[in-house]
Amino acid sequence: MTARAADRARYDRATAHLDAPLAIVDLDAFDANADDLVRRAGGKPIRVASKSVRCRALLERVLAKDGFAGIMSFTLAESLWLARSGFDDVLLAYPSADRAGFAELTSDPKLASAVTVMIDDPAQLRLIDEARDGGREVVRVCLELDTSLRLLGGRVRVGARRSPLHSPTQVADMARFVARRPGFEVVGIMAYEGHVAGVGDSVAGRPLRSRAVRLMQAAARRELAERRAAVVRCVRAVAPGLEFVNGGGTGSVQFTAAEDCVTEIGAGSGLYVPRLFDNYTSFSGRPAALFAQPVVRRPGVGVVTVLGGGYPASGAAGVDRLPVPYLPEGLRYDPQEGPGEVQTPLMGSPADDLLLGDKVWFRHAKAGELCERFDTLQLVEGDVVTGAVPTYRGEGHTFL
């Protein structure tokens, strides 16, 4: 029996009393992935990206482990909810225009001390001030550095279009602007190198592309390490009380941690290990989050139909954004249909061994987005479900 077949047998036994659709988190795999992130971080704390988890109970579980500290959130409403729930170090990783949220933040000392907001434009400070509605609390501010690699005089750009702050001078000027404005304090810098941390460098069947990605990432790491260090020096001259410099992601933990100026690493997807993280030479993890759909039809030889399953991930539309049938091994989509909103045909010889009501296990392309489809995660240890915890959706929240 292969390791994957053994996993299927465990998951089927554990959930035999539960009807699909359902989602699970394999806690043994989750904990092993957490330990591997800590190992790769080399002693630097990991701030957990909540968008990749979207479950309070699992955020609490991982933050109870040595090597993890703080949350990187994705909306202001989520940040305030987490802070009210007892999380005392929440970095909002994206700028916000939530005026009601800023009014609440600036009026509550506990929230203001727990939540740090992201800034890369003076207009964002003005929006916060206009939203204060009498709130006088000092707002903790993090400045975001654009990490993209620019070549040929800027004519070629590699990396996400995020912050407009690219050079040390630009970031330092923004820090000075914040320092001169009452009611704000610069406490951090964030620089997420998505073109290194979030792009696989070993794509099956594409050796030339894989080599090109590795060359690009090596050049990007060298350039960014030098620029990030210069940014930190310039900002510390303006804000000597700087508390943290955040960088990295699941795919670049050990590389970013090696930079002296970086004080903490951001990561989250590496806990669940969705399918987009299969194509890395720098690490390998264990799939921890899966969902199951029930077989509801047998249209013919070598074909079964499962209920639903069309859960595409965000990003540029493509096959790599689709979930994949994972267990039993050997199933594939009908290229004419793909995963459907209500039903999904699956082809391959394993289909002939599946009966109505049997579970087919899938992996999502990305991590936390799976939790937008399910209100509960069944927690599996060995071949037993030991608990069930709500996702954000299960607690009545869809923050984005």
Image (cartoon, helix red, strand yellow):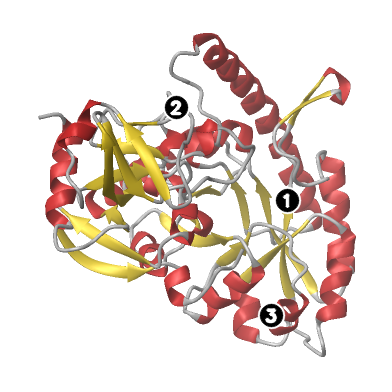
In the rendered structure, the answer to whether residue 69 lies left or right of residue 167 reads left
Q: SS at mark 1?
A: strand
Q: Which residue is most to the top?
A: 208
Which residue shows up at 43% across the image and 18% down it? 204
**Residue 59 showing in the rendered view:** yes
Amino acid carrying label 1: it is Glu
- Sequence-wise, the earlier of marks 1 and 3 is 3
Considering the image in quadrants, where does the C terminus appear? bottom right
In the rendered structure, the answer to whether residue 366 lies left or right of residue 2 reads right
In the rendered structure, the answer to whether residue 144 lies left or right of residue 238 reads left
Residue 92 horizontal/vertical position (percent): 63, 62
Considering the image in quadrants, where does the N terminus appear? top left
Residue 137, quarter of the rendered image: bottom right
Query: Do the numbered discs 1 and 3 sit on residues whose CB atoms are within 8 Å?
Result: no
Which numbered disc covers residue 66? none
Q: Determine which residue is flagged by label 1.
A: 144
Which residue shows up at 56% across the image and 41% down it? 248
Q: Between 271 and 24, which is closer to the camera in this rendering? A: 24
Which numbered disc covers residue 280? 2
User: 10 Å neighbourhood of mark 3: few (<14), some, or many (≥20)?
Assistant: many
Q: Determine which residue is flagged by label 3.
A: 105
Amino acid carrying label 2: it is Tyr
Q: Which residue is most to the bottom?
A: 134
